Image: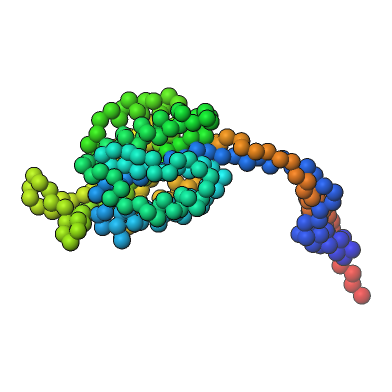
Amino acid sequence: MVLRSLYFALFLIALAGPSIGNAMKEIKQEGKDIFLAIDLSRSMNAEDINPSRLQRVKFELKNLVKNFSSDRLGIIIFSSEAFIQCPLTFDQNVIQLHLDGLNSGLVPNSGTDIGAPLKLAFSKFQTDESQEPKSKAIILISDGEDFGDGLEETLNELNSKGIKVFSMGVGTANGSTIPRGSGVVIDQTTNRPAISRLTSDNLKKIANDTGGDYFELSGEQNDIPHLIDTISKLEGTVMASRTVEASSNKYFYFLLAALLLAVIDAILPVKTLSF
């Protein structure tokens, strides 16, 4: 009875997590440089994802950027050309403000060159003061349509510098018409409403050739949490390091002693007293 009372008390002490003394712990703050390359071609207004591809992307990205408060984020917008909408910054409020204002009217809409934002991001990374390849990445968001050229050369440059591209395909295989004013976009070759569908092959190739991953966003599939988890695991540049004093939890010693006494209790013979 004494033995069981003793190890039961030790279990309770271990559960309370007693801290005895102090220990020094080093905390490192790591940061990455991430460009969000967002397709603003007219096809991103398609409504095969509610309320539209672009509106859904804006909503998801506003949640995504909150997970990278210690990283520098920048925004590149593109269609047939690519432009820096927001340079790399730690300011989350600025990023959120630019995301709110995204619309297809911000860029020329004469086709989509999916290589243009990658080339622009590579150029900005190269001219940046920080030259840590492992801390740089591009998140490419598009429906995958591509009418540009020179993509292979850009992918080789990115790969040579260890800059990974994580592509996010937006849309569905069935696709949808593209709203334009009070009507829809007309395909000039057939004189019928144009249908925009997710073309994932280009996006998968870009991710594969740069060592990144492909993700998808549609009405039935949302890989945003997986994208956040993958980007979070990237090795970042150590931005700051500090040593803090923390209490040293000693629960393990009490737990070990309680387990030892419990084992002894289990192997001891039990005698029954009769009167």
Q: Nearer the viewer, residue 242 or 251?
A: 242
The residue positioned 34% from the left and 56% from the top of the image is 55
Name the side, left or right, on which 87 lies relative to 169: right
Q: Nearer the viewer, residue 94 or 51?
A: 94
Q: Quadrant of the C terminus?
A: bottom right
**Location of residue 138 in the rendering, given as x and y in whole percent from the top left corner:** 42, 38
The residue positioned 39% from the left and 44% from the top of the image is 85
Name the side, left or right, on which 160 lies relative to 78: right
Q: How many marks?
A: 0
* Rendered image coloring scheme: rainbow
**Location of residue 97 in the rendering, given as x and y in whole percent from the top left corner:** 44, 53
Most extreme residue toward the bottom is 275
- Does residue 31 appear in this view? yes
Q: Quadrant of the N terminus?
A: bottom right
Depicted 263 relative to depicted 275: above or below: above
**Location of residue 274 in the rendering, given as x and y in whole percent from the top left corner:** 89, 72
The residue positioned 56% from the left and 36% from the top of the image is 236
**Location of residue 199 in the rendering, given as x and y in whole percent from the top left corner:** 26, 43
The residue positioned 78% from the left and 46% from the top of the image is 245
The quadrant holding residue 272 is bottom right
